[in-house]
């Protein structure tokens, strides 16, 4: 084990205080050398000196008789372990923190030359009646070491809070540079969801006509005139229903039906333009088609159009359409409406609608509630409930929930601080390709600060690149830093700037990330 802090003391007079400080520091995630409890078998002096070499901080317990042996010229200085430890720490220029016990106001005069430098060091005054204040000063003002909790909190970025996501324009991504679509933000209907919509219509129509096979159904609609026939034939090609799947033919027939005013076809055309299916992505055209269907009362289109408005901050329209769909008990719309209220900082309404969706077991709403309970306003904090939600969904192998549990364990929110469990859940989430988990695990390999995670720049870069392929801006910034500072790669400022630019195109820059990390560090110590 590598130690952060070394505690030096006299057994008579300093042991109780040293042990008390040791217990608290270990509790708070520091690696502390305390010879009574931690010294292993072997060469006593070599182990002690090695630990002093490792540590950043050297805490010296100064009781009223602390230096009696040091000042006694008849004593064997080689057996004066406190003096040997202190002299070695001074020689190595460690951060020496004297802790003065009751009745001690400073150092004695005429200390030997090898330890006289300690008189220039400052430290907090120990007071058993105001111990909390003493301990807070020790940690915040004097220690240079980071607790493991603080290290991990810096490496593992805080879980994304749903109302603070900057990457909202999920339908406005450039086709040249992939933009990150955050899985926690409400999404419009994609092609797979459209196929589910089409399958239901096809199955219902086939049943109503009494068709016994897909081929006869497809042939029937091929000979049916009008918008309904065009729509059903288009859906047959979309699904491969009675024929080979042919998206181009599907789009052609669905477009004919949409032009003739069929609401389901108009909704489908909105999806095609939204996701670039057989056409170039065109958000304005997508919204035009979706609005036509929504105005005819098609429930799926009402929800979809509301989400589109929310994602481009078209607030009045977003509220009206989402509210209409949410009141029709559409879980997806309830979730999106809660998300929209969160963006307006109306947390009571946000929680209400999220709970409505969560009652229907809409997973994203459950995750959003957990995030509110952890990262929302203080009066909403409910860490235990958040952990319960994360644990339930993590058992279903949900990557976001696994990441959420990792963050809970590393911050001790709703659970006891546990590095091993935090890393276990982080790895599970990363294995499923969840971008924030990939980056945080990459940061762990980059830093080498965590036990059982060796420093490995190549592994870090591998994880960053995997997340960057999804357009995740934090990964893009991490790669830029790898090139800027030559961590595992040759220094290349051109490539660094290219990666930084990719992140900036999504509204995230290096300065913002650094500010986030500083705020997280502050939160772990206050």
Image: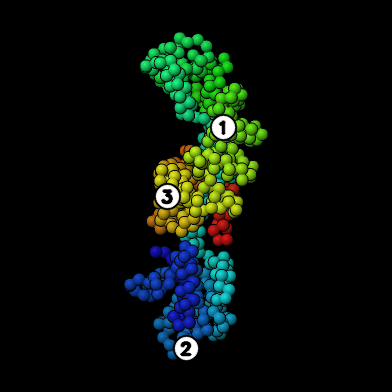
Q: Residue at x 44, y 46 (%)?
A: 392
Q: Is residue 142 visible?
A: no
Q: For the residue labelled by badge 1, is the local secondary structure a helix, a strand or a loop?
A: loop
Q: Which picture quadrant has residue 186? A: top right
Q: For the residue labelled by badge 3, is the local secondary structure a helix, a strand or a loop?
A: helix
Query: What residue did someone put label 3 on?
Result: 425
Q: Which mark is residue 72?
A: 2
Instruction: Please say if the residues under marks 2 and 3 sit with CB atoms less than 8 Å apart.
Output: no
Q: Residue at x 50, y 29 (%)?
A: 190
Q: Residue at x 49, y 57 (%)?
A: 412
Q: Where the C terminus falls, by quadrant?
A: bottom right
Give the class, few, some or many, for how many residues have Cα within 10 Å of label 3's Cα (few <14, many ≥20): many
Could you give the CA–CA distance between mark 1 and mark 2, rounded to whole angstroms?
A: 87 Å
Instruction: Please say if the residues under marks 1 and 3 sit with CB atoms less than 8 Å apart.
Output: no
Considering only order in the chain, which callout, 3 or 1, is on the residue closer to the N terminus?
A: 1
Q: Where the N terminus falls, by quadrant?
A: bottom left
Viewer-side label of 1, 3: 1
Query: What residue did someone put label 1 on?
Result: 328
Residue 346: percent from the left, percent from the top?
63, 44
Residue 125: percent from the left, percent from the top?
57, 75
């Amino acid at each position: 084990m590598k130690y952060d802090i070394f505690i030096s003391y006299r057994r008579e007079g300093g042991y109780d205080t040293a042990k008390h400080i040791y217990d608290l520091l270990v509790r708070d995630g520091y690696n502390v050398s305390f010879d009574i409890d931690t010294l292993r078998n072997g060469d006593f002096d070599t182990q002690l000196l090695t630990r002093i070499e490792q540590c950043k901080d050297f805490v010296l317990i100064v009781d009223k008789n602390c230096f009696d042996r040091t000042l006694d010229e008849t004593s064997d200085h080689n057996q004066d372990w406190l003096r040997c430890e202190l002299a070695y720490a001074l020689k190595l220029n460690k951060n020496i923190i004297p802790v003065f016990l009751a009745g001690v106001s400073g150092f004695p005069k005429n200390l030997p030359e090898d330890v006289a430098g300690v008189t220039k060091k400052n430290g907090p005054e120990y007071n058993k009646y105001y111990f909390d204040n003493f301990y807070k000063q020790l940690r915040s003002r004097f220690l240079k070491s980071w607790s493991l909790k603080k290290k991990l909190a810096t490496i593992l970025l805080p879980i994304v809070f749903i109302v603070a996501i900057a990457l909202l324009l999920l339908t406005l991504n450039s086709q040249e540079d992939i933009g990150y679509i955050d899985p926690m933000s409400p999404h419009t209907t994609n092609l797979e969801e459209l196929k589910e919509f089409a399958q239901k219509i096809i199955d219902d129509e086939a049943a109503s006509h009494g068709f016994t096979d897909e081929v006869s159904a497809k042939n029937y609609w091929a000979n049916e005139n009008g918008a309904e026939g065009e729509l059903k034939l288009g859906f047959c090609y979309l699904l491969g229903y009675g024929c080979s799947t042919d998206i181009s033919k599907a789009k052609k027939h669905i477009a004919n039906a949409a032009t003739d005013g069929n609401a389901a076809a108009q909704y489908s055309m909105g999806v095609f333009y939204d996701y670039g299916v057989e056409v170039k992505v065109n958000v304005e055209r997508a919204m035009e088609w979706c609005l036509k269907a929504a105005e005819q009362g098609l429930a799926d289109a009402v929800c979809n159009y509301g989400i589109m408005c929310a994602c481009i901050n078209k607030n009045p329209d977003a509220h009206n359409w989402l509210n209409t769909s949410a009141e029709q008990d559409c879980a997806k719309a309830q979730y999106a409406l809660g998300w929209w209220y969160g963006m307006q900082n109306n947390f009571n309404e946000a929680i209400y609608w999220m709970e409505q969706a969560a009652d229907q077991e809409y997973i994203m709403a459950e995750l959003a509630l957990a995030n509110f309970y952890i990262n929302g306003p203080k009066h909403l904090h409910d860490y235990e409930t958040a952990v319960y939600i994360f644990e339930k969904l993590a058992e279903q192998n949900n990557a976001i929930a696994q990441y959420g549990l990792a963050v809970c364990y590393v911050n001790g929110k709703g659970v006891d601080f546990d590095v091993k469990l935090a890393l276990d859940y982080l790895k599970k989430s990363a294995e499923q390709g969840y971008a924030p988990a990939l980056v945080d695990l990459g940061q762990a390999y980059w830093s080498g600060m965590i036990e059982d995670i060796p420093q490995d720049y190549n592994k870090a870069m591998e994880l960053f690149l995997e997340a960057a392929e999804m357009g995740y801006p934090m990964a893009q910034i991490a790669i830029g830093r790898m090139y800027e500072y030559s961590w595992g790669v040759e220094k290349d400022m051109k490539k660094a700037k290219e990666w930084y630019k990719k992140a900036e195109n999504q509204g995230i820059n290096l300065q913002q990330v650094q500010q986030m990390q500083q705020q997280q560090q502050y939160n772990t110590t206050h």
